[in-house]
């Protein structure tokens, strides 16, 4: 087993708003579709890495409680955090060093009310 996690879903109340937010802060395209009555916006993957989707459906409820997903912040997560508030999210933990070996993290609330995090080595 390479990864304990193989998929995650980010709940959205307003699917288009959530897709626009994540496109703006992460800087990549999100492929949109509908499956089993659920709108899904697939985050990019090369088929070998963990990925996920923005989802809107009857059973999906955004929350600041519960599981916290850490997105890849690239070379420097500050680039992502700098875009959060202009995309109508809110940074709740600025870039903070975990340790020299483990790198940095930051947290934000997205446009849907989900608490999310980013991680980078630098």
Image: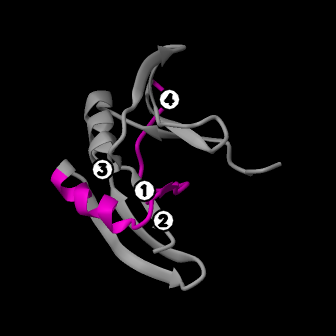
Figure quadrant of the C terminus:
bottom left
Height in image: 118 above or below 3?
A: below
Q: Nearer the viewer, mark 4 or mark 1?
A: 1
Q: Earlier in the sequence, mark 3 or mark 1?
A: 3
For marks 3 and 4, give the CA distance. Answer: 26 Å
Residue at image point 20% right, 57% down = 85
Height in image: 97 above or below 77?
A: below
Q: Nearer the viewer, residue 35 or 48?
A: 48
Question: Within 10 angstroms of label 4, few (less than 14), some, or many (20 or more) residues?
Answer: few
Q: Which residues are magenta?
A: 58-86
Q: Earlier in the sequence, mark 3 or mark 4?
A: 3
The residue identified by callout 1 is: 116
Question: Within 10 angstroms of label 3, few (less than 14), some, or many (20 or more) residues?
Answer: some
The residue identified by callout 3 is: 25
The residue identified by callout 2 is: 119
Looking at the picture, how far across and down is residue 102, in whole percent? 58, 77
Height in image: 81 above or below 36?
A: below
Tag 2–tag 3 contact (CB < 8 Å): no
Q: Nearer the viewer, mark 3 or mark 1?
A: 3
Question: Within 10 angstroms of label 2, few (less than 14), some, or many (20 or more) residues?
Answer: many
Q: Earlier in the sequence, mark 2 or mark 4?
A: 4
Q: Nearer the viewer, residue 96 or 111?
A: 96
Secondary structure at numbered mark 2: strand
Residue at image point 40% right, 56% down = 115
């Amino acid at each position: 087993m390479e990864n304990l996690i193989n998929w995650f879903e980010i709940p959205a109340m307003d699917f288009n708003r959530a897709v626009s937010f994540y496109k703006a802060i992460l800087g990549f395209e999100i492929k949109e579709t509908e499956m089993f009555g659920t709108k899904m916006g697939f985050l990019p993957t090369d088929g070998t890495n963990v990925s996920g989707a923005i989802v809107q459906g009857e059973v999906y409820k955004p929350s600041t409680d519960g599981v916290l997903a850490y997105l890849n912040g690239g070379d420097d997560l500050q680039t992502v955090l700098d875009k959060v508030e202009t995309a109508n999210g809110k940074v709740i933990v600025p870039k903070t060093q975990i340790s020299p070996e483990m790198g940095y993290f930051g947290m934000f609330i997205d446009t849907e009310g989900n608490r999310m995090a980013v991680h980078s080595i630098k």
